[in-house]
Image: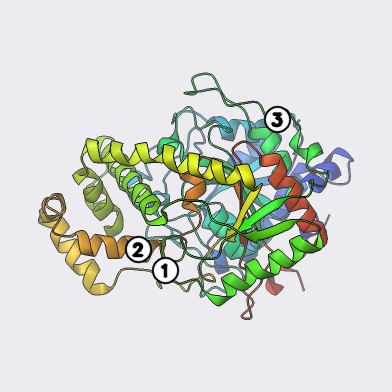
Amino acid sequence: MNVLEYLQRDAVALAEAVRAGETTAAELLQLALKQSERAQPRTNAICRLMEHEARGQLAKPATGPFTGVPFLIKDCAQDYAGLPTAYGSKALSGVVAGAHAHVVRRYLDAGLVIFGKTNLPELALKGVSDSRAFGRVNNPWNPAHTPGGSSGGAAAAVASGVVPMAAGNDGGGSIRIPAACCGLFGLKPSRGLVSSGPGFAEYWYGASSEGVISRSVRDTALALDVIAGAEPGDPFLCAEPGVVFANAALRDPPRLRIGISTASPIGTEVHAEAKLAVDNAVKLLQRLGHEVEEATPDIDGAALATSFLHIYFGQVAALVADARAKGAKREEFELLTRVLATLGSAISAGALTTQLLKWNGFARALARFHARYDMLLTPTLAHPPIRHGEGDPSTAEQTLLDMLDRVGLLGLLTRYGLLDGMIDKIARDSLQYVPFTQLANLTGTPAMSVPLHWTADGLPLGVQFIGRLGDELRLLQLARQLEQAQPWFARLPDWVMPS
C-alpha cells in the first residue's frame, strides 16, 4: 500500500485490508509516520511521538475490529501507562501515568496501534490549541487559523491525513469545535456512555465525554461500539445501547422533526457564514424528507453560560491544586490557567453547588424540547475558524491580571466582586465564537458536528445536531444519510495528497 491508497481508506477499510492480507500493521504504521513527517512542520498536531510503544504493540498478536490501524490519543485524561499525561502543560509534563485509562485500553484491545499523543491548549481549557509548552496547532486548511480546541491536535492530524480518526474528549465542545474547524465528523456521546476511569469518576462533573474525530461516520460508529460501556468502579451504570452502532447506523433514519436556531444563546454576533451553513443544511434535510422548522429550547443561554463557567473555573482550580501537590510550580502554568485557578478558588462551595443544581433545569427544558423535536440544529461555531490570537485578552488585560495574580490581589478582589466586569468580559470574549456547544455538555445529551459547509475563503464550518439523551444511533443514522447525500471523506487540503 502507498500513501495515496492509505489516504483513500477510512479506518474500517484499513482494518479490512490488514485482515485480507493486502497490507500489514507495520506497513500502515510506516505510512502514518511518513505522512506525519510531512504534516508535522505545518500543523504541530502531535506533541509526543510514541513510535517505540507502537513497535511494541506490533510485536503482540493483533485482534479486534480495528486491527493494525494507526491511531493517536489526546494528551488529556487518556492515560497511557508509563508515559506522562501532560495536558498541554509544562507543569504536568513529568507526571507519569501508572495505568492505562479504560478508554485507552479499549482502543488497544480493538487493535488500534497508538503511536503518539496530540497537542491541545493547556489543561484543555480553550476552543483553540495554543499550548505554550508544546506550541500552537495550525489548521491544515490554512495555517494562519486555529484548528479549534481543545482536541485541536487530533483534528489537525486527521485533516492532514496522518490517521483516519483520532481520540478526543469534549467538556464544552472540544470534539465538535475542532471537527467543525477542520472539515471532519465529531460526535460527543451521552454522559456516562464511555467510562472516564480509573483516573476520574465523572470528569468535569460528567460534562466531559470521550469520543473520536473522524473522516467517516462508520469509523465513529465502530469506535463507539468499542469504547461504550461502564467499567467496575464507575459512579453509575449507563444504559446499554442495545444495538451494534456499526450495523444499525447503516439504516436510514425515519422522517425526523428537527428544530433549528441560529441565534447565539448569549446574545453575541453570529457570522453570516455560520448562518449560511445552517441554511444549506436545512435545504439538504428537506430534500431528504425531514421536517425542519425554527424552534429553540426554553433555556436562558446566559444562565447556562454562567453555570458552565463556574464549573470551568472550579475544575481548573482543582486541577492546578492537584498538580501543585505533585510538585508542579505555580509559575509553570500559563497566565490564563493561573487566573482561572484563582477565580475558581474564590468561588464558594455554596455558589458552585447552586450552579450545579441548575443543570437539572437545563436538562428538563431540553427534554421538553425533545418531546416535540428529534433534534436541535445550530451552527457548531458562531464564526469561521479564527486567526491565531484573535480571541485572546488584550495586552493591557493580560498585564493587569498578571500583576494582580502575582501580588495576591486577584482572589481578594474577585471575592468582593470588584473585578466582575472584567471577568464577565473575558468570559464573554472566550465564548463568543463557541456559544452553541455547552448545552449538550451540561445536559449530558449526545451531539455531533457534521462537515457540510466550506466558507468562501475555503475554510470548513460544520453544523451541530443535538439529540435526545442516549440517542446516539439516530444521530449516526442521520449523519450517514447526510454523508451519502453530500460526501466529504475525499475532501482534504491540497497539500495533503502526494504529488
Q: Check residue 60 in the rendering and tell me which mark sits there, or answer none.
A: 3
Q: Position of residue 32 (x, y in %)?
A: 69, 54
307 or 320: which is nearer to us?
Answer: 307
- Residue drawn at x 66%, y 46% as measured from the top left: 374
Instruction: Tell me the amino acid under the disc marked 3.
Output: Lys
Spatial CA distance of label 1 from label 3 is 53 Å
Q: Check residue 292 in the rendering and tell me which mark sits there, or answer none.
A: none
Q: How many numbered markers are drawn?
A: 3
Q: For marks 3 and 2, give the one nearer the viewer.
A: 2
Among the two numbered marks 2 and 1 on one chain, the one whose residue lies closer to the N terminus: 1
Direction from residue 271 to residue 289 in the image, left or right: right
Spatial CA distance of label 2 from label 1 is 8 Å
Report if residue 166 is visible in the image.
no
Q: Position of residue 37 (x, y in %)?
A: 62, 61
**Residue holding disc 1:** 268
| Dot 2 crowding, Cα within 10 Å, few <14, some 14–19, many 20+ | some
Please tell me whether mark 2 sits on a helix, a strand or a loop: helix
Q: Position of residue 112 (x, y in %)?
A: 68, 39
**Residue holding disc 2:** 428
